[in-house]
Image: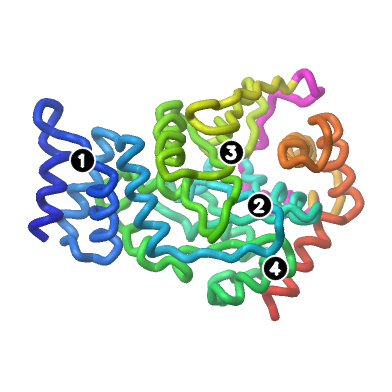
Amino acid sequence: MEEFRELVKKIGSGPHTGKSLSRSEAALAMKKMLLAEATPAQIGAFLIAHRIRRPTGAEMAGMLDSWAEFGPSLQPISDVAPRVFGIPYDGRSRTVPLGLVTGLMLAAMEIPVIFHGGDRMPTKYGLPLVDFWQHWGINWGSLDLTEVQRVFAATNLAFVYTPRHFPLAQSLVQYREEIGKRPPIATLELLWTPYKAASHLIFGYVHPPTEKTALAALEMRGTSLATTTVKGLEGSCDLPHDRTVIVGTGKESNLRRILLHHQDYEVSNLNPPLTDNVFTDIDQLLQGQTNDLLESAVWNGGFYLWHCGVVSDLAAGMAKAQELLASGRVLQQLQLIIAKVAG
């Protein structure tokens, strides 16, 4: 407890005497929080102090080191590096999340995809990905990590459910409600890759400093593959309609920007609003029906099909996305996952 108290004092002493932690100190702090070797008061103080002053790249790298040490890791299933989607755990409250539809498209084209997350989470309590899986009758929490690996190998898609597969991280969720703010762990969740080998991380963000800190942390950790950053809807990886799409790809030292304008691809400027009919609308979309979500699903799916090298340009990607939905290939991929999860 005394060792952790010194770490809290270091970052929480105010603008004049406070100091950043080194990477190793940040790793130690996260380890002690995960293993409950710090008291609840100390953990709360650390998280709110870090929230106020915001972590550095080195601090984020250190915290990721501990998540990599204590968290679960899936094994490679092919020579193709999986796309790991870093999507905010506190969900969506204004716009429809289409990340799983995109993931199903990629998996259908033999691009391995990994998602991770938990249940509705403070302080936002938005709609999380797990609610869609449960709507489809898929209970990832019923599987141990070996069984998740089996489904991953059979379907090219996996979901790491943190309450079951990373309970140490889940134990820190309560502090979100108690401090009333999203702590730096919310950024950590975007950058975590529960995979043993090289992977291609794709994460969304809202504030530009988040992107800068995240890329610095990933480069310090020696991430071998390029990272993709998306200034997406509500911090997700979904492309916006109402503004220029800003994508970064590469590493902090050589980041390349991709700017996309919806009007160049005859896409409307309307983001799909979240309604009480969201599950019905998604189901209709997967059944090949035309509804208000189709345009956004094609816009998102087309980009990622292009970005992952399935097609040569965005226009071809959008055409491919529409074909995958209309032909039932995306629905077949979901049905395969349902069958494999059931055993």
In three-dimensional space, the C-alpha distance between marks 1 and 4, rounded to whole angstroms, equals 42 Å
**Residue 183, quarter of the rendered image:** top left
Marking on residue 265: none
- The residue at 16%/61% (across/down) is 39
Coordinates of residue 103 in the picture (x, y in percent): 69, 51
In three-dimensional space, the C-alpha distance between marks 1 and 2, rounded to whole angstroms, equals 37 Å
Residue behind mark 4? 153
Are the two marked residues, 3 and 1, in contact with CB atoms closer than 8 angstroms? no
Crowding around mark 4 (Cα neighbors within 10 Å: few <14, some 14 to 19, many 20+) is some
Which range is magenta? 263-284
- SS assignment at label 1: helix
- SS assignment at label 3: loop
Farthest residue toward the bottom?
A: 343
Foreground residue, 333 or 7?
7
Q: Mark 1 or mark 2, which has the lower sequence index?
A: 1
Look at label 3 and name its amino acid.
Ala
Q: Given this view, does label 3 or label 1 mark the residue nearer the observer?
A: 3
Are the two marked residues, 1 and 2, in contact with CB atoms closer than 8 angstroms? no
- Residue 58 left/right relative to 10: right
211 drawn magenta = no
Residue behind mark 2? 81
Res. 182 visible in picture = no
In three-dimensional space, the C-alpha distance between marks 4 and 3, rounded to whole angstroms, equals 23 Å
Residue behind mark 1? 49
Residue behind mark 3? 226
Look at label 4 and name its amino acid.
Ala
